[in-house]
Image (cartoon, rainbow, N blue to C red):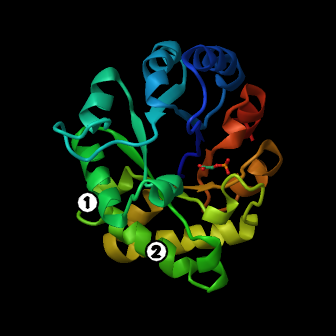
Amino acid sequence: MRRKVIAGNWKMNMLPDEAINFIQELTPLVKDTENEVILCVPYTDLFYALLNAQDTNIKIGAQNMHFAESGAYTGEISGKMLKVIGVEYVIIGHSERRQYFAETDETVNKKVKSAFENGLKPIVCVGETLEEKEQGKTINIITTQTRLALDGLSKEQVKNTIIAYEPVWAIGTGKTATAEDANDSIKEIRKEIAKIYGNDVAQCVIIQYGGSVKSSNARELFTKSDIDGGLVGGASLKTEEFSKIVNF
Ligand code: PGA
């Protein structure tokens, strides 16, 4: 049985004092869950978040990293820098980074490899745009993005990768994929992984759904056969709402 993993993606929100308050309020609300709880916070909140999440079941992640270990990359943060302060997870290839910051399947793959080299667990985002969906390209896009992101990884690394299937048209729009459609797309991603790395590996990979997840739709989505939890944007900014999603 795969575990359910619920990750919040705060994006460019929350100042340190807000992050501290959030974690202190969230802690008692999620302490009894069997699900894994992750908060992916801005770099400037990481240190505060890590201190306040100590001795709780809340894990802390970053939202991006550079693939190089160090060097002349002004403004960037490496996987090693994240690891040494105690970060466990890192989101890689979110559609906003693909769209606004020229992230490509190639840089996503380099970052995933670098994450593993530095002992971080990547949460890799894949998903089709509205245009691609309307052209009937969903499966082709998401399986290709998955294959390229995982290229060159060992079976053990693939098993430890979290994939977030996030239809781009569902992110921040209030439009959610139906639970059936999301489950079908995730099955296709799992099938693709099985083709390359074998079914035993594919059955271990956590594949989340993301895109306008809220407390009112979390249960329906997360109880589907292949949806192993969610990557939650807007609804992860309110403690009560996020705790309800965690405890779906
Ligand atoms: P949303 O964002 O929940 O606000 O749609 C999800 C995401 O971008 O990860």
x 72%, y 50%: residue? 213
Q: The residue under label 2 is which amino acid type?
A: Thr
Residue 139 visible somewhere in the drawing: yes
- Helix, strand or loop at label 1? It is loop
**Going by the image, does 176 lie left or right of 41?**
right
Which residue of the protein is positioned furthest toward the right in this rendering? Answer: 216
Q: The residue under label 1 is which amino acid type?
A: Leu
Residue closest to the eye, 221 or 71: 71
Q: Is residue 147 above or below residue 90?
A: below
Q: Position of residue 46 (x, y in %)?
A: 45, 24
CB at disc 2 and ligand 1 closer than 8 Å: no
Q: Earlier in the sequence, mark 1 or mark 2?
A: 2
Residue 167 visible somewhere in the drawing: no
Q: Position of residue 144 (x, y in %)?
A: 42, 75
Which residue of the protein is positioned furthest toward the front in this rendering? Answer: 74
User: Pointer 2: what residue?
Assistant: 143
**Going by the image, does 212 lie left or right of 6?**
right
Q: How many C-alpha atoms fall within 10 Å of the one at disc 1: few (<14), some, or many (≥20)?
A: some
**Going by the image, does 153 lie left or right of 140?**
left
x 66%, y 56%: residue? 171
Q: How many C-alpha atoms fall within 10 Å of the one at disc 2: few (<14), some, or many (≥20)?
A: many
x 50%, y 72%: residue? 142
Residue closest to the eye, 87 or 78: 78
**Going by the image, does 1 lie left or right of 121?**
right
| Numbered tag placed on residue 85 in the rendering | none
User: Pointer 1: what residue?
Assistant: 153
